[in-house]
Structures are given as C-alpha cells and as structure tokens.
Image (cartoon, helix red, strand yellow):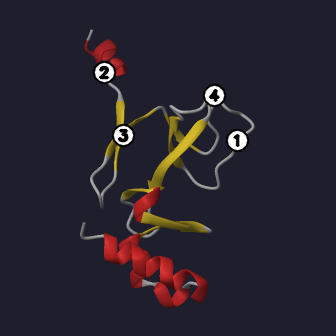
Amino acid sequence: MADSKAKLKPKIFTCAICDIGIPYVYYGRQPKSALQVVFLEEAFVAQDPFAPEPRPLCLGSKCCICQRAVCVSCSIFYTKRFCGDCGYRYKASFPCELHAPLEKLKEGAGK
C-alpha cells in the first residue's frame, strides 16, 4: 500500500539557487513522450503547458561541477550545464562571449 502512495506523489524539481519548485515528469536525455527529442544533458523535463500537443520542456539539470540541481534561468549551458556560481568561478575558462551572461548570472544569484 505504501508503494502505491509513493508512485502517486509527483516528483518536484527544485532549483538550488532560486528555490523554484516545479513538477517534472522525466529525468534523462530522451523523453519517452517525444522520441524525436534528445537533450545534450540529463535534464529535468516537464510537459509544456502552453503547447497544443504534448511537447517536452527542459526545466534544468545538475551542474557538472557541484552537482546541484539548477534551473535554466540560474545556469548556463556550454557543452555541459554550469550553475551561476561555478560558471562565474571558472569564468576565465569560458569564451569571452560568455563572460557577460556569466556576470548577469552572478548578479542574479542573490535574488
């Protein structure tokens, strides 16, 4: 009986930086509801509530350095997902075109 209750409990993705909590339906690279979509990372995926037909929506992923779950607004993807803190810490390793977006992530981290 306890197992059936656990299955009914929705899974919630919570960003470690902004603390937003969003229900998700899948974690991985290729959602079973959209086999034509393959993410470049293991992602937390929800169904897009505004799409007329089922469509996957990437909520975020785990930072490749610190392993914290972070939403797409609090992170940057450059070959892998980096949270704002780790991205800023290793800013010198990124192309100069990404330095401004990393600065914005750092500014927004305390909000």
Q: Which residue is mark 3?
A: 22
Under tag 4, what secondary structure?
A: loop
Give neighbour class at mark 2: few <14, some 14-19, many 20+ (Cα, 10 Å). Answer: few
Evaluate if marks 4 and 3 touch, with contact meaning CB atoms under 8 Å apart.
no
Q: Which residue is mark 1?
A: 37
For marks 4 and 3, the one nearer the N-term is: 3
Residue kind at label 1, given as amino acid type: Val
Evaluate if marks 2 and 4 touch, with contact meaning CB atoms under 8 Å apart.
no
Q: Residue furthest top?
A: 1
Real-space CA distance between mark 3 and mark 2, rounded to the nearest whole angstrom: 18 Å
Real-space CA distance between mark 2 and mark 1, rounded to the nearest whole angstrom: 28 Å
- Horizontally, residue 80 falls left or right of residue 17, namely right
Residue kind at label 3, given as amino acid type: Ile
Q: Which mark is residue 33?
A: 4
Q: Is residue 7 above or below residue 101?
A: above
Under tag 1, what secondary structure?
A: loop
Real-space CA distance between mark 4 and mark 1, rounded to the nearest whole angstrom: 9 Å
Q: Position of residue 68 (x, y in %)?
A: 36, 59
Residue kind at label 4, given as amino acid type: Ser
**Residue pictured at 31% horizontal, 23% vertical:** 9
Q: Which mark is residue 6?
A: 2
- Horizontally, residue 8 falls left or right of residue 29, namely left
